[in-house]
Structure formats: C-alpha cells, structure tokens
Image (cartoon, coloured by chain):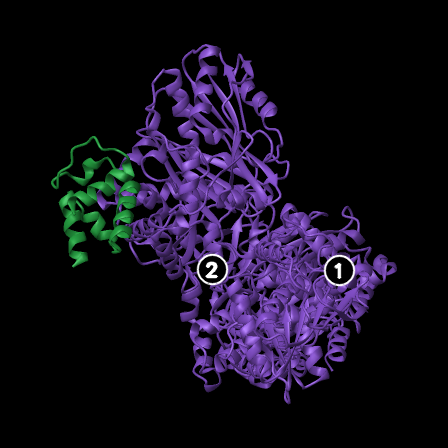
Amino acid sequence: MTDAPKYEREGFFLEFDLTSSQLNFYNDGLAADETMWNHIGIIRFNKKYTRQELSDSLDRLLQLQEGLRLQVKPTSHGPVSFIRDFTKREYPFFSFSDEKEMETRLCEIMNRPRSVFEELFDCAIFELPDACGYFANIHHILLDGFSTYIIAENLRDGLLQIELPADSVLTYRECVENENNHRLTKRYARDVAFWKEIFADRPQTALLSAQERTFDFSSAQITCDIPADLLARIRTFCAKSDAAPDSFFLAVYASYFHRRFDTNQFAVGVPVLNRNYGKQMHTVGLFMHSLPLIIDINADISFAAVVQSIEDSRTNLCKHQKFTQHDLRQLLKEDKVSVGSLFDVVADYIEFPKNDDFELQFFFPQTLSVPLEIHVQGFTDDTFQLTLRYRTACFDAEEIRLMADAFLSICAFAVGHPDCAVADLPLYSDLLQERTLEQLRVFNDTAASYPTEKCIHTLFEEQAAKMPEKTAVISAEETLTYEELNRRANRIAHALIEKGVGKGDTVGVMLPRKTHLLSALFGILKTGAAYLPISLDDPQERIRHILTDSKAKMLVDEDAVRLLLTAENTENPHTDVCGQDTCYCIYTSGSTGEPKGACISHGSLLNRIMWMQEKYPLDADGVILQKTPYTFDVSVWELFWWSLFGGQLALSAPDEHFLPAKILEETDKNKVTHLHFVPSVFDLFLTYLEKNPQKCKKFASVKQVFLSGEALSASLVNRFYALFDYREVKLANLYGPTECTIDVTYYDCAPNETDPVPIGKPIANTQIRVVDEKMQTVPVGVTGELCIAGVNVGQGYLHNPVLTAQKFVKDPFGDGKLYKTGDLAFWRSDGNIVFCGRQDGQIKLHGQRIEIGEIESVIASVQDVQSATVVVQTHAHRQILVAFYCAQTECERAIRAHCELHLPQYMVPRVFVRLAQMPLNANGKTDRKQLMQMPVQLADIENGAQDAQNETERMICRLFSEELGVSVGRNDNFFDCGGTSLSMISLLSQPYFSDLTREDFIRNATPMNMAVCLQNRQKPDYSVLQLLQKGENAEKAIVLIPFAGGDAASFAALTYAISKRSADYDIYYVRFLHTEEDIRTAAREMIALSQKRKVFLYSHCAGSAVAVRILRTLEQDDKNAVAHFVAGGSIPPDKPVKRNIWRTVPLFAWKAMLKKAGAPFVALEKEQVGDVYARYLLDTDLYFDTFAMQCNKLHCPVSLLMSKEDVFTKKYDSATMIWERYFSKVHSVRYIAADTHYFQSENSEETAEFLLTVFE
Amino acid sequence: MFEQLVNIYRNIVGNDEVELTPKTKVSDLMLSSLGLIQLVCAIEDEYDIEITNSEMKSFKTIQDVVRVVEKKLK
C-alpha cells in the first residue's frame, strides 16, 4: 500500500501535503486574511477548576491531538502542512462577572482575521462566578464539527485526570496517510462505479435556480427546540422502521421541499464522518465532508416509504463515503455530465453522548457556502435544537421561520401517521394556523356600509336633480349638463321599456366613445336591464357569438340610439331594480377558447365605487378622463364614478387613448384630476415625458393616477416620481379580475418603490384568501392561489353554470361565494398582497420547466432595457424561446451575455428582437399573442455551420441543427443546445454516426470534438496523432503541439488559417505528452506518417519540449522523418533550471500572469481553471526537465516564430543563440505582429503564412 | 471463514480482548451503524463480493455473516 515515503524530514518538522478537503478550502481563498474560516466555540464546565488545572488539561490536549499543532506553509510546490512539536504555552486568561459580557468580549478579542499560514489554534481560559471553561477559535482547516466534541471530551478527561490508553488514538498523520492511500484501494474502484451509476441519468440536483443562488454568501440563522417528547417519538418511529433518525429528518425535509419547490428529485448534501470506525473516532482533524444524496419523491408515496428509501440511499452513500467531493467533481467532469451545483442544501443530524460535565456552544460564521444548512443537534435524552442557517440573498427570514415550523409540524404528524401520503402532510403547525387565521381576520376586516337599496342610475338621478346645470360630460363634439344627460337617458329608457326591455334582460351596446354612449348606458340601467359592451373592432364572428351566447334582448348601435332618442318621455322611469340585479356583463377571452360573459350586480358595483370615493375622494371639481375601451372593466368606474358625486367626465377621442401626446392634451384641456393607465401604456407615456419634460406641466391638474391590468414594476413608479412631485399627484396600484367587479385590492405607491410592488390590501367588504391546492389557507409569506370573497364577487358567467360552478365555489371560510382567480400571490406581514404571476404562467420546453417571468426579469435587469417579453414560438415544428425587448439601442449582445450569466442554457432565448414598442392588445396590455405570431429572423440552420472548418464538422453541425431545431456551431455542446438522451439516440441511429458509441457521443458532444472522434474511429491508424483537418490533395502533413495547458482547441484558428491557404496539408495534433512511452509512440507514428506525407512540426511555447523529445527519439530511428520544425513563442531557459518555477507561483498569481500574456482562460469556470492550472504545472515540469538535459545537437532544420510583445520571450535577441545549443542550425526567424503570447490564435493568419513559407 | 471475519472485525475496532464465537450477536460487537457499514465494506473488499443493504440488516449473529459470505463465494 505504501509506495513512496510520505514525509520528508526538514528541520524539526514533518512535512506533508494537504488533504483534498483542505485543498478545496485552500483554493476557495483560504490563504486570504479572513474571519470566515474561524470556528469559534465555548466549552463550559459548571464547576470550578483552577487556572492551572485548566491550563494543564489544555496542554494535554495539544500533546495528544497533534492535528491541533498543524501549520501550513507555502512552498515552491504548493502549500504543505507540518506538525509543530509540542511546547508548553501561556494561555490568555479572563475573569468575567457576567456571561453575556463574556461572549461579546471574547468574540471581539478572538475573532481576528487570519491567514492559513498563521497560528491556527487560539484558545483562552475563562472564569465566571460559578463556572469556567475554554473559549476556542480554531481555523477550519484543522478540524470538522465532530472534532469539537472530541476536544471537549479530551479537555474534560484532562480535568478529571482520566488517563487515556496511549494507543487508543490514531495520530493525525496516520489518518491523513490512510486518506491519501484510499485511491489505491479496492474500495476506490467501487466508489467510482457507484458514483458513476448515481449520476448516469443526470439527476436533477438543484433546488434553486441559478439565478436564485447568487454570489452573496452572507448568512443568518434561526434556532428552535425540538421537544424531548417529540424526539422520543421520532426515535421510537425509527427503531420500529429500522432507520436512523438522520433518514427520518431527511424525509421530513424532502417532503417539505417537494411540496414547496414542486420538485420530485433533488440532492441534499449529507455530511459523512469519513473516519475509520474505532481509533479514528478520537482523532481531531478535518475529515468530514458532504456528499450529495439524491432524493426521489412524489406526492402519493407514504412518508414511511420515503424514510425507507432515504435510509437505503444513505447506507449506500456511507459505503462510499471516502470518495471526496473533489473526486466526484472530477469524475462528473470526465463524464461530461454537467452539474451546476451538487446540492443547494446541506442537512445533518448529530447526537452527542449525554454528559453532565460540560456544555458546548458554537458561534457560526456569518457566511455560508451553500444557500441553506439544516442542523439537528443535541445531547442524548435531552432537547435537541433545529438550526436553519441560510444565505440572506436566497431566503428571507419569514420563509425560513415557516420552513422551521413546517419541519416540526411534519415531524409531529408523521410519527403518528407513517402511512400518510407526502401530499397530505401538514405543512403548518396548529399554532401557526391559528396565528394565520388571526392575522387574516385583521387583514380582511374591511366591513364598510354602502347604500344597498340604491343603484348607480338612481344616485345619478339624485345628482341631476341637485345640480342640473353642472357640466356632466365633455366630448370633442359636445358638452352635456347633468340634466341634459339625464333627460336623454330617460328618453332611451322609456323607448327601451316600450320595446319590452326590463329587469333581467341584457342589452348589447356598440357605440363609439361619444356622449351618446353615456346616454345609452344610463338609459339601459334605468330600464333595469344590464348592459353588454361590444367592441366596434371585433370581427363579425365574435360579435355574433357574443350576441347569441348572451341572448341579448337588443343591440344598441348608433342608428338605434338616434331612434331611441326620439321618445318623448324625459321623466325618470320607475323600476324595481335592486342591488341583486345584474348591472353589466363583460365578455372576457377565456384561456380555453370561447369568450365568456362575466356578470356584475348593481350592489357589487356600488360597493366598489363607494369604496373608491371614500379612499380617493372626488368632488364637484373632479374630472375623470374616460379613455379605457368600454369592453375592459376599468372603464366602468371611469364611466360612472363622477356621476354620483357631481364630478365630470371627459371622453377621450376614440382610438387615441394610447398616444401620450393626445392624453396630455386632453388632460390639460379638461383639467382632468383622475385617470387610469395600464402599466405598458404608462411606460410609453413616461418615456414620452422623459423625452419632452416641458410637457409635464400639461399633467398639472392630475391628483390621482390609477394603474391596473398588468404587474406594475417599481421602475415605472420611480420614473414617474422623478418627473412629478409626490405631494401633488399620487399613484395607486389596483388589482382585480373582471369577474369580481373591477378591483379587489389597492396599494398606494410610495415615491421610492422596490420590486415587487404589492397589489395591496382588500377594498371595502372584500376578503382575500390565499390558499393551497387543497383550499387550505396558507400562512403569511407563502405563495398560493389568490381567491376572492365578499361583496365584490360577481354573479358568474352568463348562461354558463358549469364554468361558473368551477370558478365560483362556496367560500369555505364564510357564507358567500369564493372566486378562484388562478393568480398566485402571498400576503406580506404588513397586510399587503404581492402578486407572483399566473398559476399557468409556466411552460415546458425541451422537457424543462420554465417560468417565462423569470427570463423576462433577467432581461429587464439589463441596463438600457425598458421592457421585455418572452414568448414561445414554433419553428420547424420545434418550440423556441423568443425575447422581444424595447431599448434605445441595439443591445442583444449585452442581454445574451447577461442571460447566459443568470439563466440555465435552456432558458436563454434563442432569438432576441428589438422593438420600437411592445404591441398592445385592445385592453392596452402587452399583446403576447401577437408576439407569438410575429415573424422573426432565425439564424438559419446553415448559419451555425458557418464556423465549421471541414466537411465533417459542417455535416455534424447540420445534423445537430436539424435534430435540435436551433443553429449549432462547431463549439456548441449538443446537450447545452437542448439535446436530450432521446435526441442523442435518434442521431446515433443515423448511418453517419454509426461508428460512434453512446459514450463517444457524450464525451465529444461538440461538432469539433465529434468530428475528430469520427475521423479517429474511421481511421484508427494512429493513437497519439489526431487528425484535425484533411487536405484535399494532401502530400504533406503538419503536426501541431500545444502550449502548456493547451489542447486541440488552441489550434482551431490556426488550422482554419492553414486550410484556407492550402489544400496540400493534412493537419495533425499531438497532445502534450509526458511519458517516454508516449514520446516513443509519437515518434513511431510520425515515421509511419512520413512514409505517406512529408512531415512538418510546429509547437507553441512549452510544447517545444515535446517536439524536442520526439526529435531526440527520431534522431536515433529515422532522423529525416521530420522535414522542418518551427518553434513558436519559445526560448529554452538560458541556464538549466532544476525546479519548475511555476510551482512556486500561487493560483491567483498564475492566473494574473497568464491573463497578462493574453491567455484565453479568463472566461473559464472556476473549476476548469483549476484543471488548466494542474495541466499547466505538469506540462511545464516536462519543459524544464527537457531543457535541463544535455544532448547532442539535433540536425532537424529549425525556425523560430516570436512576438516582440510576448512577455515570455523578452530575450528574443538571444533566441537563436540559445536554440543553437540544441539544434545545429536555426534556419530562419520571424517576429510576428501580435500583442500576446498566444499569437497562434491572435494572429493565426501570419502564423499560417509563415509556416507555409518555411515548409514550401 | 469465521476466523477471517473476526480478524477483519478486530482490524477495524483495534480490539482483541473480547471473546467471539459464531453465536456472538452482531449487536454485541459494539459497532455503531457506521461501524457495521465499514465492516461490511471491508468484507466486500476482502472477498470481492457485494452485500446488499437488506442482507446487512438481516445479520443477527456472526454465523449469519459467515453464511452469507460463504454463499456468495460459491
């Protein structure tokens, strides 16, 4: 098992490498001066010991646990750790009179920022009036959570003078050795197979979206008790079902996440001890690590079954617990399985053996490496604590409180009902439910009186009698007084009554926005009938459908009005219409086909208008601008409100209600005080004013603006208040479905809003209920379906009892009816409601669940983007996401980059289209339907293949594109472009790919790699030489060797540049070779190749070492195999270097230097950078070795290509001289025009040109 | 076989004082669930066999373990 000496004695210390867990931390910035790695705890004894006793025990601990004497130091070959010999120390001593004071003081003193290279174990001794103990601040690299308990026990034993048998503790060194040797064991091979299988089907591991995860690691926590009796019942449950409490708690979390995040599969990080049973259980050190436990769950299985399946998975996981996260990430990357995050939540259960001697208290750091950690910890037979630690950017405190409550509630219920289906577990405790009901009682306490025996038209009649001469309606054509309007309405009413129209009837109205409209509407109401507005723009078919469906008694159009007005009776008619009778009926388009008529009673409307008057009083000077089409229910308050209170109505010219200039003109002319906007029109309006600020004064008369019909963004509110004074004009956000009398909630916007802007509180006599799928009230903060109860609830759909019964159900919390909106919302604790989109706002694309709103908000957050709408379009029978956006300038690149940064690939729209403005539908909302139909220019399928560099690549690009319906370029990964295992199988069954296995496909999922793979499969002549490009009439071959850390992709541009110039060359690639055997193989294959082609060699930078080694081998076998060698960007070291200097450079400095040299690593993911770095070090090792070796001069002709700007070849003057130590003659030297070291890409044209010149 | 298994066990716990017989109960081996899993892993690796979770849970005495391992080796 041991193959090399593990330690090397240096001075007085034993040095050894960091373990992989430690290295993980190290690469995460452990070397920085930070407090986030400090593990701080108090060990407290409720008994008095002397300072000497306490100090002696601490000495003994340090003597026993050599891991606590660990230190780290940087060396030329990376950080190493060593163990200091034990020496007695003086420990700081503090005496406090009060506990609280102690904690704060000690935290202040002890929690210092420190780097990993300093002392890692700080400990102080404290004394209280009745207790004493230790305050320790230990660097995380020294220990895991389990170790803290070992420390406490050791200290206790020291104080009690309990002698430990000397050999009962495995030393830290022995543990590290075991860990390092794990790779050589049989178990390791089993581990690999196990984890490969777990991830074979690419399980869904994430709980949060990439966007939700964020990079803000700040954290907070809450802790609550798990009562001892509940814990006892949990233990009984576990004993009966032969499962560990760990599995029970994981099942509880899983049930909750399944319900709240609507997911059937996800991973929880489970910390495993990773200690050998027995002796290592007493060794302090960093051994624990978290591994992903994949949980599969669904609504119907029983809780007990979930526990069983988790217990089984946990057992399997424990059998492979020595496989580190680092190993796992390596493995997954090898397999090209993309795992964004291995898990978003870590959960552990720790039971400390009961003890009466000491108490342990931990102070958690304020940052968190995962979004959520769940800890259940405690002492046997005692109360346990449930602690939730969370990133504040991912969760808010309320959500976490609810989560904790839900966990406890599920625990309590599940122990008594093991067979309960996951879907039926109670997510809220009884206590919380009571509290919620109490809160809701307050939020929904909206009782207010309104005149129940009156109707809109009778109140208007009263006003007309009171102020007959007052102006009522102004239109472009004429102005009517209250009396004039009332008389006209009465004529129409009497004429209609004559025709038999009365209570219970419906009368269609189809009139332009002129004074006649008002006369007709009041006239109809006065008969006792309900009015039914019909759009003049509607297609004939729809009008016919509405008239038939509504069984309208009559249709009042312009001709009819003229006729009706000829009636002579101008007295108010007397009808017995009451609050229960229908006042109006508005047809709304149903998401499922035919439009349906929503009916509203006089009582509901009166309540709604009386509330508005109470809240936003309108007096005799009040003027409302009527600009909303009357088929949209906002028009209803515009049309009637003023008439009850002596106000006035200004009719906007038809068809111009969207035009900002027109709105301003009419507002100014009529001194409008109240008006309404749909947010998207408001957006246009504000944009107009921002461009024409001098026009703002035309808005001076306005006191109140109402917004409704769409979600309101804070930016609109804030833009408005950048133009206007909050003291003079107010904004209110209203919300409500047509079915429930215009609006049911209101929110008065503040001048400085943040998203999401709430839809506010319920209006008078209205109750809002937010419920889950079982119609149970959900607590404050939890999203559910918004339902409406109270006076505002409408009568239902005209002549459609089935649909009415479906949407208007019995209110389970009251007497009346409850309308289910299908909208999602939650209560804030201040009683305001926040709207969160539609229940059906979800789409599925390529099998992935997508929230359109999420994509839209990401795009909208790009600077300069004013608004964005994403729709699904169908192209060539495939659905793709198309984003439309409004912005001053074309910014597709910025948006795409932003999306790629914040969204998973499958959520990034394929196409971005800039529009001058969003198309609006008749109601002034963004017209999604129109956008879905809008023709867009798809980058055509051939387009993606444009960067293809040979026929094979072009063919693969095309086949991929056809399969996926999107354009695929040579570097695009099939799976990132929406490819699934199903589409892969479909491709593999095509003859073109018949040479490939499934594994080949997954490993080479880009057209470029697959082309190489295909060519190799078809022509397996060479094992080291890889054909990149075939020349059509090739007689010669160029073999390319990359720079340190480079790969075939490094030569993509050069390959293209060469093949563009000449079809005479086959282009081969040789990876950076390290072993003598590979070098010999390469030499052998080049000899074979040289029999068919004249072979030329090009290497870049450190690749020259590989070239030189191959040439040295060839020197003995066939010295003419290579016709010419060009060394690019490379000068051997002036003096032989024994050690690779790059190994002394830390990762960040390496990155900075390579960036300076122009390396294309900047865009790489963090993990990939680590890979490249590792390769880079290995590659440069060979480089320094090669040129440290003395050899005979090679006689192969050599030419040099360098850039004078290259930071790595500053000594270009002496290049020839140095190279001629290794070669008999430098043939030619070219200084290329390039700014960076990586000129083979930067200036591939000149590189190609030079190579071809030299090789001719 | 019994002797071999006992050796594997002693190797893990580092304890050779307790007297063990085929009838010794697994629950008397003073192994935690983690210790038992480790023992099973060591047996799997030693004999190159696979022991399922349900087999592991069925172990009552050392004799049970012997039986399962012998069956697998056949």
- Tell me the number on the disc at residue A332: 2
Q: Position of residue A741 (x, y in %)?
A: 56, 61
Q: Chain of mark 1?
A: A
Q: Toward the viewer: A558 or A302?
A: A302
Percent coordinates x, y for residue A1114 in the rendering: 59, 71
Does any portion of residue A788 appear in the rendered image? no
User: Which residue lies most toward the bottom here?
Assistant: A1033
Check disc 1 and report its element: helix, strand or loop: helix
Question: Relative to residue A411, is residue A930 depicted above or below?
Answer: below
Chain for disc number 2: A
Give the x, y percent position of residue A1059.
68, 82
Q: Which residue is mark 1?
A: A1218
The color chain B is rendered in: green
Amino acid identity at mark 2: Leu
Residue at the spot 59% in from the left edge and 64% down from the top edge: A1072
Residue A159 position by quadrant: top left
Residue at the left extreme, as displayed: B23
Residue A309, percent across and down? 30, 53
Mark 2 falls on what kind of element? helix
